[in-house]
């Protein structure tokens, strides 16, 4: 669990909090004065690798912004498996739903590596909304982004072929990193392979087999966390064939 926060952030922590919150889409264009007032009620917490921010069903005390490290949000299935919903990275927020009504967390969150997170307490943020109603719209916009992500994930999981899920994910990564116009490119996997497999709704073994198949087709090679796109156009064609479109 996170270490107990101090009652008020120190000057050094205020600088860190301000910098991280400013990078968060929710607060990217908030006024300097509003951001300073928001920082006063936030707490920077250290969480070791594998430590939990919260458990599913636990009474909520606020939402979080990742300052450093990574946080895996998941639910546990009936057979005890951990189903990853999403992994959050620095500058991303999670758990905002507790601000607008939910009294407990709908999923669990634990760190993938040693991390620091910013806790924005529920009672404090609600008091800030009363003074600055624009914050309510920011929360709704952030929740909408999470909803869009979940809708896209559900659509991906409806795809019949495991290859389709993996290839579609790879192509989205290429697009988000501005690599989709290059004939070949490379990037670093943003999360461990076992978490990627869980997020895609497949086993680690299946993910390895798909990567091997793509390597055999001379489309992609994966070495550790390094992904080399050898033929992006070919990868797009592979997806079409896997979906029976071509």
Image (cartoon, rainbow, N blue to C red):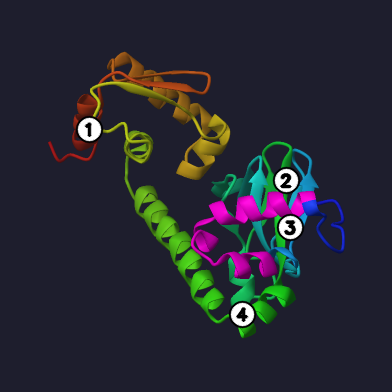
Q: Which label sits on residue 116?
A: 2
Magenta stretch bounds: 12-38
Which residue is at 27% across, 33% downward?
Answer: 180
Compare marks 2 and 1 and give the one earlier in the sequence: 2
Between marks 3 and 4, how big is the CA–CA gap?
24 Å
Within 10 Å of disc 3 (Cα), the crowding (few <14, some 14-19, many 20+) is: many
Q: Position of residue 8 (x, y in %)?
A: 84, 62
Is 34 one of the magenta-colored residues? yes
User: Main SS type for the magenta part?
Assistant: helix
Q: Position of residue 96 (x, y in %)?
A: 60, 66
Compare marks 3 and 4 and give the one earlier in the sequence: 3
Compare marks 3 and 2 and give the one earlier in the sequence: 3
Secondary element under disc 3, as helix, strand or loop, is strand
Query: Comparing marks 1 and 4, which lies closer to the viewer?
Result: 4
Query: Comparing marks 2 and 4, which lies closer to the viewer?
Result: 4
Between marks 1 and 4, how big is the CA–CA gap?
45 Å
Residue tagged 1: 236
Q: What is the count of numbered marks?
A: 4
Compare marks 2 and 4 and give the one earlier in the sequence: 2
Compare marks 1 and 4 and give the one earlier in the sequence: 4
Within 10 Å of disc 4 (Cα), the crowding (few <14, some 14-19, many 20+) is: some
Is 83 one of the magenta-colored residues? no
Residue tagged 4: 129
- Position above or below: 202 against 109: above
Which residue is at 79% across, 54% downward?
Answer: 11
Which residue is at 46% across, 24% downward?
Answer: 208
Can you see residue 78?
no
Secondary element under disc 1, as helix, strand or loop, is helix
Between marks 3 and 1, how big is the CA–CA gap?
39 Å
Can you see residue 63?
yes
Within 10 Å of disc 2 (Cα), the crowding (few <14, some 14-19, many 20+) is: many
Q: Which label sits on residue 54?
A: 3
């Amino acid at each position: 669990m996170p270490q107990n926060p101090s009652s008020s952030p120190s000057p050094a922590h205020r600088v860190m909090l301000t910098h991280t919150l400013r990078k968060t889409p929710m607060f990217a264009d908030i006024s300097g004065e509003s951001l300073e007032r928001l920082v006063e009620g936030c707490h920077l917490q250290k969480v070791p690798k594998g430590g939990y921010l919260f458990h599913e069903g636990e009474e909520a005390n606020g939402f979080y912004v990742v300052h450093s490290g990574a946080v895996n949000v998941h639910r546990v299935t009936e057979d005890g498996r951990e189903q990853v919903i999403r992994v959050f990275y620095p500058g991303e927020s999670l758990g905002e739903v507790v601000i607008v009504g939910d009294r407990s967390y709908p999923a669990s969150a634990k760190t993938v590596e040693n991390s620091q997170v910013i806790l924005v307490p529920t009672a404090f943020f609600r008091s800030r909304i009363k003074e600055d109603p624009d914050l309510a719209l920011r929360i709704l916009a952030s929740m909408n982004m999470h909803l869009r992500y979940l809708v896209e994930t559900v659509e991906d999981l409806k795809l019949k072929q495991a290859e389709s899920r993996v290839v579609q994910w790879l192509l989205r990564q290429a697009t988000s990193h501005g690599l989709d116009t290059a004939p070949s490119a490379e990037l670093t996997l943003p999360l461990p392979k076992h978490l990627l497999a869980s997020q895609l709704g497949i086993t680690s073994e299946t993910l390895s087999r798909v990567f091997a198949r793509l390597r055999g087709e001379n489309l992609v090679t994966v070495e550790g966390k390094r992904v080399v796109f050898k033929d992006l156009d070919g990868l797009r064609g592979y997806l079409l064939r896997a979906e029976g479109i071509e």
